[in-house]
Each structure stands twice: as structure tokens, then as C-alpha cells.
Image (cartoon, rainbow, N blue to C red):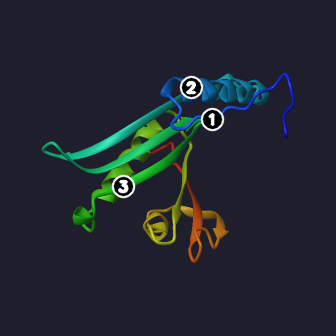
Amino acid sequence: MLFESPYTIERIKNPSEALQENLWNLLHEFSVSKLGDPSFEKKEFFAILVKEGETLVAASLCYLFFKGLNLQLLWVAEEKRGLDLGTKLLKQIEEEALGLGATLVFGYSFGFQAPKFYTKLGYEEVGMIPDYPLGQNCYFLCKKLNIDSP
């Protein structure tokens, strides 16, 4: 047993939004206290949706913290790929990031997804986990934003 009394361990499947928010807030509060710069306090979690009528055709989840925007996911419906929706959505994400004071956008993409899509649009590969998932690679990507232009 790793933890002994007075500690207990609880595994929660699908933690509530309130619990997730509380945990992120605790970590963020600690981290900002160590950074010593109040401008790092701003954080925001948001989605950008692209719809055709009522049908979702592309979307992103983003988390802004420490003046960086973590692009957690960018998805385009398979039948809409090749129509420039991903590029336009990524440009919208970058505009949102700049409007929120971010200096960079970062995220990851697996080899079977779209790492070349990001590098073609100015993202730099800054790391990689080889053979994850098995037979593929996971690429970490980052783009510094030009804060002088929209």
C-alpha cells in the first residue's frame, strides 16, 4: 500500500466539471505564486465551433494559461477535410489567442493525424514521443505569435 492512514485514495471516473476546475485552479494558483508576475494570472478554457446549419463540422478546445494557448484539440469532419476549414479554424484560434494576450500556441498531434498540417502553417516541432501509440509518434508543436500583427 502506497498511502497509509490518515490518507485515503479515491479513483473517480469522469470527474465533474467542478472538481476539474477546482484542481486546475489549485495548480494555477500555486504556479502563479512561483512565477511572481501577476500578468500570468489570466486563464480561460473555451471551444470554437464551426457549424453548417445545426451540424458541427469543425471544432477546437483551447486552454489559455501563462500567456500561452494550449490547443487541446482541433477536429474537422472527415467529409469536410480539404476545404480549408482546418486552416481557417486554426487562424481563428490564433486570433483569439492574440486577443487574450497569448504569445504562443502549443499542442500535439499524432503521426496519423496532422502534424504536417501544423508545420505547414508555421508551427515548429519542439518534441516527440517515439512509438506512441505503438507504431506511431506523438509530436509536440508550438508557434510563437507575432503580437504586432493581427
User: Where is mark 3, residue-wise?
Assistant: 75
**As drawn, 58 above or below 23:** below
Up-down relation of residue 52 to residue 26 (above or below) = below
Q: Residue drawn at (66%, 66%), measured in percent from left and top? A: 129
Q: Residue at x 33, y 48 (%)?
A: 59
Residue 150 visible at all:
no
Q: Which of 149 and 144 is in front in this view?
A: 144
Dot 1: element? loop
Of residues 16 and 54, the one nearer the viewer is 16
Dot 2 amino acid type: Leu
Q: Quadrant of the N terminus?
A: top right
Decide if residue 148 is on the left or right side of residue 28. left
Neighbourhood count class around disc 1 (C-alpha, 10 Å): few under 14, some 14–19, many 20 upward: many
Nearer-N-terminus badge (2/1): 2
Q: Circles 3 and 2: CB distance less than 8 Å?
A: no
Left or right of 68: which side holds 1? right
Three-letter code for the amino acid on which mark 3 is drawn: Trp
In whole angstroms, how far apart are the C-alphas of marks 1 and 3? 24 Å
**Foreground label between 2 and 1:** 2
Question: Residue 19's mark?
Answer: 2
Q: Count how many numbered circles sit on residues in the image.
A: 3
Does residue 37 appear anywhere in the picture?
Answer: yes
> Which x, y percent locates residue 43?
55, 29
Label ID, residue 127: none
Can you tell which of label 3 and label 2 is closer to the viewer? 2
- Residue to which mark 1 is pinned: 66
